[in-house]
Image: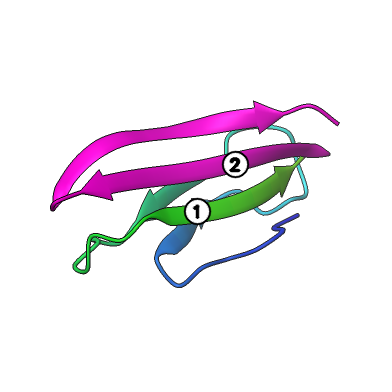
Amino acid sequence: MLHTLPGWLNINSGNGRSTGTVNYSVNPNTDLEKREGILTIAGKIFYLFFIFENGILLTEGVILKPI
């Protein structure tokens, strides 16, 4: 189940009906602002983030949040 789907986040595979892999991609960040998104997959919550400073990507990651 997709919790939120920002316009910059794309789900490329995974239909929610079987076990397996969910593949996602992100569109280019032309304004270099912080991005955040939340996905719920198989009952687990994943927090995606990308942080920029002065046009440089400082950090990115995916965190599995405890339920």
Residue 59 in picture, x, y percent from top left: 31, 33
Q: CA distance from mark 2 to mark 1?
A: 7 Å
Residue type of the residue flagged with mark 2:
Tyr
- Tell me which residue sits at (19%, 67%) in the image: 30
The secondary element bearing badge 2 is classed as strand
- Residue 60, quarter of the rendered image: top left
Q: Count the marks: how many?
A: 2
Query: Would you name the residue on which mark 1 appears?
Result: 36
Query: In the rendered image of this protein, does residue 6 appear above or below residue 26?
Result: below
The image shows residue 53, relative to residue 59, as above or below, that is: below
Decide whether residue 43 is among the magenta residues.
yes
In the displayed structure image, the side of residue 17 where residue 54 appears, left or right: left
Q: Which residue is mark 2?
A: 47
Q: Residues within 10 Å of mark 1 (few under 14, many from 20)?
A: some
Q: Residue placed farthest to the front in the image?
A: 54
Magenta-tinted stretch: 42-67
Is 64 one of the magenta-colored residues?
yes
Q: Position of residue 10 (x, y in %)?
A: 45, 61
Element type at mark 1:
strand
